[in-house]
Image (cartoon, rainbow, N blue to C red):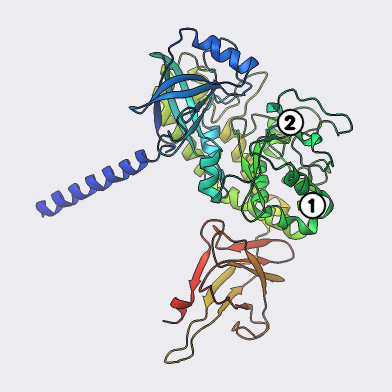
Amino acid sequence: MNKFFTTLSLFLLLFSQNLLAQEEENFYNPQSIRNFKITFEQDNWQMLLDSMRLYGDGLLIGNIEIDGTKYEDVGFRWRDSKSFSTGGKHNALHISLNYIDKNQNHKGYKKLKLSTALRDPSMVREVLGFQIARKYMPAPEANYASVEINTEYYGLFVNIEAVDGTFLEKHFGSSDNSFFKCTPENVKNRVTPKGCKKNLFASLEYEEKASCYTTNFEIKSEDGWDDLIELTRVLNKDIDSIESVLNVDRVLWMLAFNNVLVNLSSYSGYNSQNYYLYKDDMGQFNPIVWDLNLAFGSYKRVGSGSDLNLKQLQKLDPLLHADNSTKPLINKLLSVPLYKKMYLNHIRTIVYDNFENDWYKQEAESLQLAINNELLKDQHKQYPDSDFRKSLSNTIGKRSKIPGIVELMGKRSKFLKKHDDISIFPPSVEEIMVKGREKFSNDMVKDFKISAKVEKRAKRVILYYRYNSDEKYQAAYMADDGNNHDGEAGDKVFGVAVKPGPDHDRIEYFILAENIAAVGFSPANYMYEPYTSSLEELNK
């Protein structure tokens, strides 16, 4: 018996060590603090970085050691951030490992972004926010970094994955298509050209002249202005064709994310900013969220009136801007009944996945515990240690009034859960089947006959399918008419037959079910884990 327990203990020890090693292998493991040691030859390195930030676009060359691995000829500059100050002791950093050697990288990452967590005494808004976003759409990873510069401690920062070519290749399989950063504040010398609308920011309102876009969007690709103009034209003037140029579902996820998390320094707030747009190889623009340090109500402006107070933030309308024509991503998309139901379903999903079960609270507490000791060392931090400890549960500051995350989201979760547009649950999709070859039959299955039982008065059931993961989904309506092996007419079993071409023997799919009030998806994680089937499996 003792031998058994000794063996078991050894196994568990090795297993836990293996898990730890896997976590450490992930550069952006949220619970880890990376160690950056930066060295510059120049004693006046801070003045040089200040000057580059104010007057030029260059990078200062230096060296860096990341968790013990050394890299030379690395480019550094202060990030375009509201937290920047000349001579500041806690400025956000952009680090270009491949500034000189184009192939130089750390664990595959060529560029690194360090955030000061401006207006976030909790230090968890960005890391927690990106964790939630990544469950539903492509979004950066994030954790923390302890930074030394020329052997002196510089501070604890949030370490955020750059949205660059490496990121695009990972999520979209390409990086050379039209690509824009939608942060008007970062566009230098921003003066609205004559004949262009003022204060559009990155709202995607339509204008004919490319010059009207250059002051509101920062182009990151070699070209693409015509693609952006076409996107805005279709969005504003031809909404029925919108899926030809925009990944609508991804946009609806982003908008739902912004609303639930009260992330108003975004498209959903005053300035229509802090996101990227990348056109994938299928011709659709995809949104990518960015800059979450002001999420969870730290920024409070929606575009009209004064800053929202805590109660207003807790009860922020899930249909905010639905009637606002200057926010076409919201106004135009939510004018389509199906898209509106999908958006509300995404809000419901985010609430129940992360907030109603208190997952966010446990994760926030865990993140704070992981960085507590390191933060105590930081003499340049923006807030005292007492604010860090209180910031999850209490409002910090008498003038700026940054809400406690739990204080905000506890009541917001309950408000959304009971909201008339969200409390009604969608049809349930069950007993999903793909008909295989009959036992002892020589007749091979040549198509995919898919059926599902759908409860709660479904008025429409749609199968979305594709043959390869790099293709767009196609839509096919499922019917409860007794055909396509869906049972008998009216038995709530819906079916459809998909006939693949000669070069296709595998299918990926998910099902959308709609009733008069709501829509639901099966599987719930259809964005990343759709159902699959193959003719080979069906013919066994």
- How many C-alpha atoms fall within 10 Å of the one at disc 1: few (<14), some, or many (≥20)? some
Report whether residue 140 is seen.
yes
Q: Quadrant of the C terminus?
A: bottom left
Report the front residue among 387 and 264.
264
Q: Which mark is residue 234?
A: 1
Q: Which mark is residue 76?
A: none
Q: Quadrant of the N terminus?
A: bottom left
Residue extending farthest top = 43
Q: Amino acid at mark 2?
A: Arg
Q: Residue at x 68, y 45 (%)?
A: 255
Q: Residue at x 52, y 13 (%)?
A: 89
Q: Is residue 319 left or right of residue 71?
A: right
- Residue 83, position as x, y percentages in the image: 60, 20
Q: Is residue 287 left or right of residue 438?
A: right
How far apart in space, not on screen, are marks 2 and 1 (Cα)? 28 Å
Report the front residue among 158 and 347.
158
Q: Residue at x 55, y 33 (%)?
A: 125
- How many C-alpha atoms fall within 10 Å of the one at disc 2: few (<14), some, or many (≥20)? some
- Residue 22, position as x, y percentages in the image: 34, 44
Can you say whether 475 is above or below 332 in the image? below
Res 374 quadrant in image: top left
Report the front residue among 393 and 239.
239
Q: Amino acid at mark 1?
A: Val
Which callout, 2 or 1, points at the residue further toward the start of the chain? 1
Element marked by disc 2: loop
Q: Residue at x 54, y 57 (%)?
A: 525
Can you say whether 525 is above or below 401 in the image? below
Give the residue pinned by disc 2: 301
